[in-house]
Image: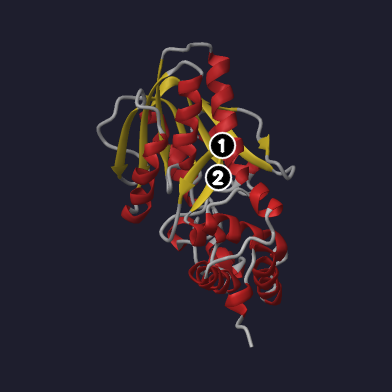
């Protein structure tokens, strides 16, 4: 009797993986099985769909099954595949850093728009703090470089594990972008004022973390999630310290929870920022709020 490895094709291995993921309760089992096969074989999805009877080697089949076991255990798919797309770029990610989410692209777009409204296309000094994988800062710097700015980028995080991913992802930057990767608590101590500070800080209230999906609560780093008892601890610190690190007309642009926009606006106003209206994410939730330094 033939073993399952003897007859594994793209079609059969996809079906097998999808069934395993569905049994684990994953809502997008079919799609995730497709992504696991595509990522593991380094094939575009179009080729998988065009060649369903292509035979999978024994080694490939075993690797696919091991990855399906990991995903069935609710490990983030991006950790398993080792990368994720964000803002048109492919970032490497893994344990020690958050997986970049599509909603964070709204933070990038908002920061880019605010600089464009200011009008100058000269040098721009950009700080992305709580940077994690570096996705927000690197994606924004890449886009600003394409817009014609001379970009000086600083990526800051307090966690060495996260900065290791940011350093690896810095390969995505054009050589024209001047880069510093700094381990510090929110702000470096020896920088000239910035035109723009972006941050997606921890904003989950401490008591809610254990109730999140296991992909987040079990696998992603707790220190990148825990925003204190009310989820706002880092915003108070950022708003309080940022004026000393921003030029007079500079911007502090913050991603936050879907129900935190009013609180963030109040925190920024109390520190003297001119607050811009909050911006909706792709799901229709208020996700990004910006303040401009006016003193």
Horizontal and vertical percent for residue 91?
47, 45
Q: Position of residue 29 (x, y in %)?
A: 70, 65
Q: Camera-side residue: 201 or 76? A: 76
Question: Is the Cβ of the residue at disc 2 closer than 8 Å to that at disc 1?
Answer: yes
Q: Is 277 located above or below residue 213 in the figure?
A: above
Q: Which residue is mark 1?
A: 88
Q: Identify the secondary structure beneath mark 2.
A: strand
- Mark 1 is surrounded, within 10 Å at the Cα level, by few (under 14), some (14 to 19) or many (20 or more) other residues, namely few
In percent of width and height, residue 265 lies at: 60, 37
Residue 114 visible in rendering: yes
Q: Residue at x 34, y 53 (%)?
A: 159
Relative to 197, 179 lies left or right: left
Q: Residue at x 40, y 43 (%)?
A: 169
Q: CA distance from mark 2 to mark 1?
A: 6 Å
Q: Which residue is mark 2?
A: 85
Q: Quadrant of residue 156?
A: top left
Residue 293 shows in the view: no
Viewer-side residue, 104 vs 259: 104
């Amino acid at each position: 009797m033939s073993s399952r490895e003897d007859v594994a094709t793209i079609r059969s291995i996809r079906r097998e993986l999808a069934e395993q993921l569905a049994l684990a309760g994953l809502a997008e089992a079919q799609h995730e099985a497709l992504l696991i096969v595509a990522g593991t074989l380094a094939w575009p999805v179009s080729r998988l769909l065009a060649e369903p009877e292509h035979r999978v080697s024994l080694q490939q089949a075993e690797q696919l099954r091991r990855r399906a076991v990991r995903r069935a255990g609710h490990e983030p798919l991006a950790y398993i595949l080792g990368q994720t797309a964000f803002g048109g770029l492919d970032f490497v990610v893994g344990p020690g850093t958050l997986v970049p989410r599509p909603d964070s692209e709204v933070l990038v777009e908002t920061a880019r728009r605010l600089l464009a409204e200011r009008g100058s296309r000269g040098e721009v000094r950009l700080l992305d703090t709580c940077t994690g994988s570096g996705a927000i800062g690197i994606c924004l710097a890449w886009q600003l470089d394409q817009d014609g700015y001379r970009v000086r980028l600083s990526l800051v995080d307090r966690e060495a594990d996260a900065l290791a991913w940011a350093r690896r992802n810095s390969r995505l930057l054009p050589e024209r972008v001047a880069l510093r990767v700094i381990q510090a608590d929110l702000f470096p101590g020896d920088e000239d004022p910035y035109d723009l500070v972006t941050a997606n800080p921890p904003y989950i209230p401490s008591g809610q973390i254990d109730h999140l999906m296991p992909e987040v609560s079990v696998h992603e780093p707790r220190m990148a999630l825990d925003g204190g008892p009310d989820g706002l601890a880092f915003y108070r610190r950022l708003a309080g310290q940022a004026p000393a690190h921003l030029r007079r007309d500079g911007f502090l642009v913050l991603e936050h929870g879907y129900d935190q926009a009013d609180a963030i606006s109040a925190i920024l106003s109390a520190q003297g920022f001119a607050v811009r209206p909050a911006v909706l994410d792709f799901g229709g939730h208020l996700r990004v709020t910006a303040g401009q330094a006016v003193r």
